[in-house]
Image (spheres, coloured by chain):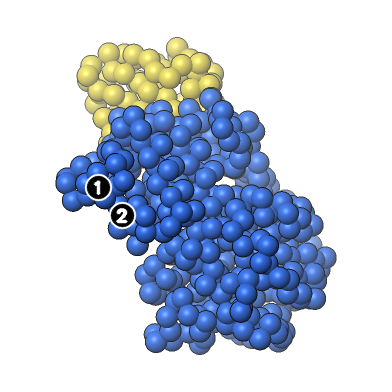
Amino acid sequence: MPLVKLFANLRKIAGTKEASIAGASVETVVSELVKRYPTLAENLLENGQIRPHVIITKNGHPTTAKDMPVTEEDEIAIFPPIAGG
Amino acid sequence: MNGWNGKILEIDLTTLTHKAYPLDMEMARQFVGGRGLGARLLWDLVGPDVDPLSPENVLIFTNGPLTGTGYQTSNRFSVTTKSPLTGTVLDANSGGFWGMQFKKTGFDVMIVRGKAKAPIWIEIKNEVVTFHDASDLWGMRVFALTEKLGQNNNKRNVLCIGPAGENLSRIAAIMNDRERAMARGGPGAVMGTKNLKAIVVEGNERPDVADKEQFKFMLYETRKLLAASPLTSQALPEFGTVVLMNIMNNIGALATRNHQQTQFEGAEAISGEELTEKYLVKNAACWACPIGCTRISKTDKVEGEGPEFETTWAFGAQCGIDDLAAIIEVNSLCNDLGIDTISAGSCISWAMEAFEKGALTLEDTDGIELRFGNAEAKVVTAAGIRRIHEGPIRRTQALRVALE
């Protein structure tokens, strides 16, 4: 299954740093993630869709395509909005 | 007066005199903000023939029109000068409290010219300027000096240099409010060459705004926006700017081992998440800032502000060091000595690469194995900085090359 890694306050909200989540696209992986960790819903979803400010990368490449295919070996990283310096 | 006081304070250290005159408001409007105004003033005051470490160079401290008004995050101020590191325009800015307090003295800009015959420090209370002998303060580190001169965040604020500035290190910072730094380009060396150890400000002028009702409305609206944003209400207060570490690493944008790689295997160990979990005492904020991204961190050896993302990157990924406690301690040491953490970490990473490739030897480094992330790296880093800025400057050949 694809490995999902969570960062910043998403870890505290979910109570975990990472989880193996089934899904064939970015959207379905996020949907399944929220089903397993419902407390993430408010931070990741808005009207059932992935919030626009949530940052998602697949194997280190940022993606905004919800239907981006995901394979068993892929790593999906999810970040809340982040800035600073 | 639309946020401005409308006054420039000019100090001549050679004659220990000062004068005040009106700020050209057309210039202030055209080159809005501390940075713009500072660059414009420098254009008139310092030409290409001026040596940055000569009395002819000037230090220009500037506020913007919002500084000190109470608008959210309106605490930053700038210093502009000719850089002893690059030989061109230097602008560095800082948060904290000093900028707000300087605005309350009744001035917008302070231009410092010349060179004092002996070490001095300047005290500005409202519009009264006093020169004090600083012979007994020369050599003091930043933390002790800041306390000695009476730092009180909302009433009296200290800006100073440490031993790095006195030794004319080209990466010396000007420090304010104990652990805030105006750092890149070596402004601390310009202050050091002028024999100016500190500038302390106290004031009770409050800058006026053009439309008080509209200003209150904007304060209210901004407060709502900051509270609603997950960035300013969650990520930054909880994890500080180091929250950037993991995402920069994830996307391959984290310069590592002196830019030889773009990802660091130890990034998680030096991340904002790790900092919050293991070393954070509490968060803190600059004046008028509801975000509070400042970290108060504690290890077995030190407790203080920071580290910020860039510091953690420079001493961490760039040096191949995944020991966050060591990075916190080196950050504290740099702040106390008044040295730019980003430049110091980057220079040391350069020296590490040079050592690993044989361009520097044990003879150059006084026997220090200056390798990326080795077991002694944290000691090497701290000891190297201390040697350069408290011992004879040229003793450690490797770091002399790196830092000069």
Crowd tier of the residue under label 1, counting other residues whose Cα lies within 10 Å: few below 14, some 14–19, many 20 or above: few
x, y (%) of residue B122?
70, 71
For image coordinates 59% across by 59% down, the residue present is: B139
Instruction: Please tell me in which quadrant of the rendered image residue B401 appears.
Output: bottom left
Viewer-proximal residue among A3 and B274: B274
Type of the residue with mark 1: Glu
Q: Secondary structure at mark 2?
A: helix
The chain carrying label 1 is B
Give the side of residue B138 with respect to residue B371, left or right.
Answer: right
> Chain A: what color?
yellow
Please state which of residues B382 and B304 is positioned toward the viewer in this rendering. B382
A37 or B176: nearer the viewer: B176
Q: Which mark is residue B397?
A: 2
Residue found at x 60% / y 50%: B179
Q: Position of residue B400 (x, y in %)?
A: 34, 57
Is residue B48 visible in the rendered structure shown here? yes
Contact (Cβ within 8 Å) of mark 1 with mark 2: yes
Instruction: Give the answer, above or below, for where A65 lies relative to B308.
Output: above
Tell me the distance, in whole angstroms, between the alpha carbons under discs 1 and 2.
8 Å
The chain ID associated with circle 2 is B
Q: Specify the chain shown as blue.
A: B
Q: Which residue is mark 1?
A: B363
Mark 1 vs mark 2: tell me if same chain: yes
Counting from the top left corner in percent of width and height, residue B168 is at 47, 66
Q: Is residue B308 above or below residue B389?
A: above
